[in-house]
Amino acid sequence: MKTNKQIVASYYENLWNNKDKSYIDKLLHDNIVFRGSLHISTRGKKEFEEYFDMILNAIPNLYHGVEIMVSENNLVAARAIYNGTHQGKLLDIEPTNNRISYNGASFFNIKDGKIIDIWVLGDLNTLYKQLGRA
């Protein structure tokens, strides 16, 4: 059985960086709750997949560079740098083709070997400046 840190590492590497949506079923609990920095909340795998598709449509080359992960019991915290190019509509922001790079921290709750809760806190001030929204 994978450790909680390995589960979270797979979330970043296989799901997001390799853009392999089969990992939604492999890693996420049926009742996954996601709260993101962009004022988006999802419940369940289908809503999470819609969020995933929206983000990758806006930033198709998005890369999550994980800098540190800390795990205690069923909780994992990760600090990452998000990098990519804004090539599609992101919420109400039309494509700018600007490169983005901003920091974030995510907090994961693992239940029965699957991620059941994710809370992401990103540096939106830096992101919005890079998208021309200061």
Image (cartoon, rainbow, N blue to C red):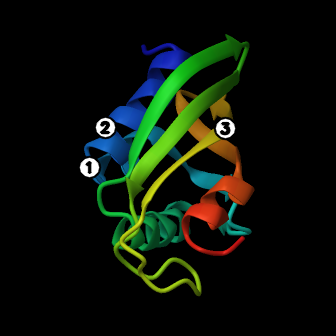
Earlier in the chain: of badge 1 and badge 3, it is 1
Q: Is residue 11 visible?
A: no
Quadrant in the rendering for residue 115: top right
**Nearer to me, 57 or 28:** 57
Earlier in the chain: of badge 1 and badge 2, it is 2
Dot 1 falls on a residue whose secondary structure is loop
Give the CA separation, mark 1 to mark 2.
6 Å
Residue 116 relative to residue 98: left or right = right
The residue wearing badge 1 is 20
Residue 23, position as x, y percentages in the image: 34, 45
The residue wearing badge 2 is 14
Give the CA separation, mark 1 to mark 3.
20 Å
**Nearer to me, 127 or 112:** 127
Q: Is residue 110 above or below residue 128?
A: above
The residue wearing badge 3 is 106
Which amino acid type is marked by label 3?
Answer: Ser
Q: Residues at badges 1 and 2 in contact (C-beta under 8 Å)?
A: yes
Which amino acid type is marked by label 2?
Answer: Asn
- The residue at the point 37 percent across, 52 percent down is 62
